[in-house]
Amino acid sequence: MSNVRRFGAAGDGVNDDTEAIRHAVKDGDGMLHFPPGTYLISEPIEVALAESGPLGIDGTGGTARILMTGAGPAFRLVGTHCGTGSPSSVKGNVYPDQRLPTIRNIEIEGTHPEADGIELIKTMQSVFEGVLIRRCRHGIHLAERNRNVLISHCHLYHNTGVGIYMEDLNLHQIIISSCHISYNRLGGVRLERSEVRNLQITGNDIEYNNQDQHGTPPEPTAEIYIDTSAEGASVNELTIASNTIQATPSPGGCNIRILEEGDSTSRPPGLCSISGNIIGNQENNVHITGGYGIAISGNCIYSCANRNLLIEDCRLVNVGTNTFRRHTPKLGTGVRIARSADITFSGCSIHDEEPSGQVSGASLLEIDSSERITISGSQFIDGVPYGIDVSNSSYVSVTGSTIHDSREIPKSRRAVRFTGPGQGNLVALNSIGFTGPDAITADTESNLTEHDNQIHSLG
């Protein structure tokens, strides 16, 4: 174990320990041990894993702190792994000397506007555990190529950039679990211009990742931001499960944002599951553009400035057993599906809890310019102006659902409305509670068939 004090580090937060720590990297045994104290560094500590051998960084149960006063990452770990996660692709001295770089139980704080926490390049089986990174630009920055990354029990907190940033990256197999990722200005977990597979984000608290605590102008961001709009970028095998994901509303902000706008040769986000999360309090809680093959189930999604769930230009999305609601009159609720196909919406409930209706004036479920949309076994309660509002769409089926206005003074104009051209639309076997004529209304060109709906007067 290389105690950095034995290589000349003062650990007093005053003297510059950069060269002493580099000395420990060069001439130590690979286990950098930081006793309690504050270690000031002014330049990145770069470790070439192929030369240094196996590396570990330990901060003595969290009692050691790195104070980064310069630009760049406090630690940059550089390997040579250019293969995949397959054992047969691991070449050279990757396994004997580079595998399993482990950083644990240490704090990194930045005092320079371009200071980052830790950067990984071409590493294999990196592990972060019990790391606190704050007041930096980016917390953990994954670049170029990495494989089999584990991040757990970490705090990525109050950074001016991103908590965990995947940028210009080829990465397979990463698990982010049991972390607190909050108050990072440009997002909690953010991915851009990258090809990533097997990204699992589970059991974390990810919240308030926007400009609110930084005193800077707002810009579109999200707690989890997946952007594969660049040519050649893609994400597949994405799991977002059992997290608390919430925020304060910000212009263009989302709790979860999945964006694909590339050309026809790029692969859209696919094989994606968003399940069992608490998601709320942003402009759009979940906003998906260009997605394909996505399951959204078992979530409690609450309070939006625009929509709880916004699905645009998507195919093959299953939305099931979610609760959509709002917890404050100044925010709203609702789902919008636009320019999409092959969507199922089942076993969900949407309730507008404010007697005066939504500030946005949006209906509970809106479907526009879409086809093959199946809505079944769901509840739409107290929708203003409509429970379900469909426009310019075909093969929309609404069956076995409850669409009621339960207020003493009903506000709904209609329970269900179809407008614009369409074909093959169906409303059947629903329980509709509505006071007034024409609970279900449709333009002639919508080609709507109605049968066996029970329409109750609740007045």
Image (cartoon, grey):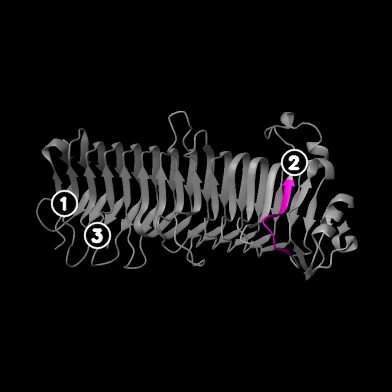
Which of the pair 257/429 is nearer the observer?
257
Q: Could you tell me the amino acid type at mark 3?
A: Asp
Image-quadrant location for residue 90:
top right
Image-quadrant location for residue 42:
bottom right
- Say which residue appears at 88% left-offset and 63% top-offset: 8
Q: Which mark is residue 382?
A: 3
Q: What stretch is highlighted in magenta?
A: 66-77
- The residue that label 1 is drawn on is 455
- The residue that label 2 is drawn on is 79
Q: Residues within 10 Å of mark 2 (few under 14, many from 20)?
A: many
Upstream in the sequence, badge 2 or badge 3? 2
- Residue 304: % across, % down: 37, 59
CB atoms of marks 1 and 2 within 8 Å: no
Image-quadrant location for residue 72:
bottom right
Residue occupying the far left of the picture: 437
Which of the pair 136/97 is nearer the observer?
136
Q: Is residue 457 above or below residue 231?
A: below
Upstream in the sequence, badge 1 or badge 2? 2
Q: Could you tell me the amino acid type at mark 2?
A: Gly
- The secondary structure type at the circle numbered 3 is loop
